[in-house]
Image: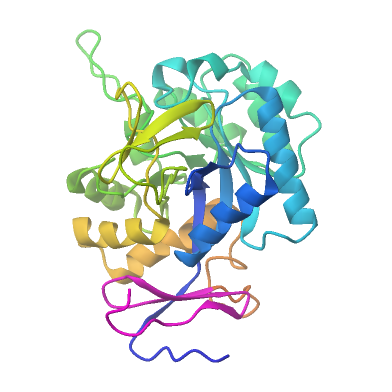
């Protein structure tokens, strides 16, 4: 059925490389039906490609979730699922954020768990300064897995060393990153400053209006530009749920508040409750970035960071035919997946 795109912005389908769940379901659940519900919810919100992101949990739970992903991909039951992103469990305890400390593990343990490599694994976020991380990074890169530095207290020298080993990406700027310190006379930059000063690495921001204020989003964009800065949702199972609802993310519990989620003890934000398309609109509103740049940060840039471009994140010949129509306010009005309409344009006023 043809779609009339008159008056709409035509964009590649959105690519979310850091997304945990929606509507009460988390990707650590070993249930294909739960995964499909999450994938479908984000698809209707404009995200046509996802890396299902697993927060730190136990080895058995992680293995079971990876097996679900592999089964869905093999059976072609999840066309928007490009693979799995392990966020942890090899993270620095001091920068763990909402990750459950009891489920963090050493690089050597994780290396054993991921040998042989699970079929669906596509990206791993880890703290490169931890003992044994070099061996884990080298193994993952040799196996074709993208490696991201995150929840880390790495120094600039440690990040440079990790980059030489093949680390190519940085998880959510300002979240779980060491920053400038002054232990004596001299100032020592942390991972945050090294991230902003990098010249090759791609990096993420969560532009949900709660994780980062406009000034920090602007700084990130000015430092990295739209071709290296990725918008991610970091959406959790709290997405689409009412304030007061509790949910699981990995091995931890979050609670939905008005527009954001936090851990039960309110010591940390707990992912977001915002789909990627909404973060794109907020990035535009908060920073004044052009529509073209905002959509680049939600399509081509994350697709490149994940090694999926130009099949994903583009409208070039040979791409998969994933398309989103936006109105001028950057509200999603229609979604096309693989050339097939998933939702048609809504009449004016019927959002």
Residue 87 falls left or right of residue 8: right
User: Which quadrant: the C terminus?
Assistant: bottom left
In this rendering, is residue 33 above or below 113? Answer: below
Residue at figure coordinates x 29%, y 52% from the top left = 221
In this rendering, is residue 122 above or below 345? Answer: above
> Which quadrant would residue 238 be assigned to in this image?
top left
Is residue 235 magenta-colored? no
Residue at figure coordinates x 41%, y 56% from the top left = 276
Residue 344 falls left or right of residue 242: right
Residue 104 falls left or right of residue 191: right
Q: Magenta part of the protein: which range?
A: 323-351
**Camera-side residue: 276 or 295?**
276
- Locate residue 279, reporting x and y percent: 33, 56
- Locate residue 44, reporting x and y percent: 49, 66
Is residue 324 magenta-colored? yes
- Locate residue 18, reporting x and y percent: 49, 46
User: Which quadrant: the N terminus?
Assistant: bottom right
Residue at figure coordinates x 57%, y 54% from the top left = 37
């Amino acid at each position: 059925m043809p779609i009339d795109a008159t008056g709409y912005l035509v964009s590649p389908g959105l690519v979310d490389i850091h997304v945990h769940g929606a509507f009460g379901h988390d990707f650590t659940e070993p249930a294909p039906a739960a995964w499909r519900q999450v994938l479908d919810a984000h698809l209707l919100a404009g995200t046509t490609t996802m890396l299902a992101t697993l927060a730190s949990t136990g080895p058995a739970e992680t293995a079971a979730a990876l097996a679900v992903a592999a089964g869905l991909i093999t059976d072609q039951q999840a066309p928007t699922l490009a693979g799995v992103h392990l966020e942890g469990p090899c993270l620095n305890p001091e920068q763990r954020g909402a990750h459950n400390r009891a489920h963090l593990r050493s690089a050597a343990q994780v290396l054993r768990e991921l040998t042989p490599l699970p079929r669906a694994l596509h990206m791993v976020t880890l703290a490169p300064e931890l003992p044994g991380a070099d061996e884990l990074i080298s193994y993952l890169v040799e196996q074709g897995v993208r490696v991201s530095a995150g929840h880390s207290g790495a120094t600039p020298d440690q990040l440079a060393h990790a980059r030489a080993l093949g680390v190519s990406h940085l998880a959510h700027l300002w979240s779980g990153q060491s920053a400038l310190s002054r232990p004596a006379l001299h100032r020592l930059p942390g991972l945050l400053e090294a991230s902003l000063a990098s010249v090759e690495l791609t990096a993420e921001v969560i532009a949900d209006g709660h994780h980062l204020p406009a000034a920090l989003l602007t700084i990130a964009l000015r430092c990295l530009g739209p071709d290296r800065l990725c918008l991610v949702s970091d959406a959790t199972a709290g997405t689409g749920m009412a304030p007061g609802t509790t949910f699981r993310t990995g091995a931890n519990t979050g609670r939905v508040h008005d527009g954001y989620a936090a851990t039960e003890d309110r010591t940390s934000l707990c992912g977001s409750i915002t789909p990627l398309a909404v973060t794109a609109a907020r990035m535009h509103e908060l920073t004044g970035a052009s529509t073209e740049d905002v959509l680049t940060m939600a399509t081509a840039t994350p697709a490149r960071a994940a090694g999926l471009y130009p099949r994903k994140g583009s409208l070039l010949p040979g791409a998969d035919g994933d398309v989103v129509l936006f109105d001028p306010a950057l509200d999603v009005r229609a979604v096309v997946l693989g050339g097939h309409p998933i939702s048609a344009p809504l009449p004016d006023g019927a959002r």
